Image (cartoon, grey):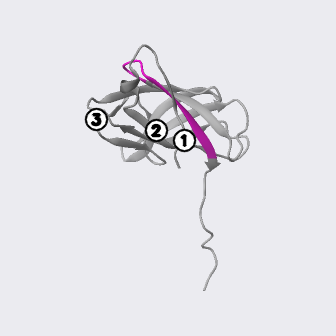
Amino acid sequence: MRFMLTVLLCGFSALAFAEVKVDNAMVRLLPPGVPNTAGYFSLTNTGSEDRVLVGASCAAVKKAELHDHQMVDGMMKMVHQQQVVVPAGQTLTFQPGGLHLMLFGLQAPLKEGQQIPFTLMFANGEQVEVSAVVKSAVAEVDHSHHH
């Protein structure tokens, strides 16, 4: 499923903006009372130059940060990333267990199917507006029955 994205033209040509594409944007729905959640999406750089993602903002939360899961001293830890390079002609997938957008301090409880807007910010000044759908943390088939 693709989500419409709006690009803010901050003194750059529209052609440059067409080179960054966001697909499958979602925000994880967690139980009521959990103050933080995560955003996931695919970020494709169709251009000929690397793009550097340096941050994000989201009005639905107090703070949004780029994070990655990394092995540190034999333990898997969530590590804040100051920037993430999106190589020319490649797609980076922000997903559970890997790169993700950490959303701290929800302003209000989320609801399944709700649209959450956020802005991705790049080192060159580009900003990409994204609308992510809220989806349940676990969408799995019940395999508990026995044959």
Range shown magenta: 122-134
Measured from the top left, where is residue 71 in percent x and y? 37, 45
| Residue 4 visible in the displayed image | yes
Image spot of residue 22 (x, y percent): 46, 38
Q: Nearer the viewer, residue 25 or 18?
A: 18
| Residue under numbered circle 2 | 22
The C terminus, quarter of image: bottom right
Magenta span: helix, strand or loop, mainly?
strand
Residue assigned mark 1: 3
Q: How many tags in the picture?
A: 3
Give the residue at x 37% y 47%: 74
- Going by the numbered disc 1, the residue's amino acid type is Phe
Q: Earlier in the sequence, mark 1 or mark 3?
A: 1
Image position of 71 (left or right of 55): left
Label 1 – label 2 distance at C-alpha:
8 Å
Relative to 26, residue 88 above or below: above
C-alpha gap between disc 1 and disc 3: 22 Å
The numbered mark at residue 88 is 3
Using the rendered view, name the quadrant where residue 90 is placed.
top left
Name the residue type under label 2.
Val
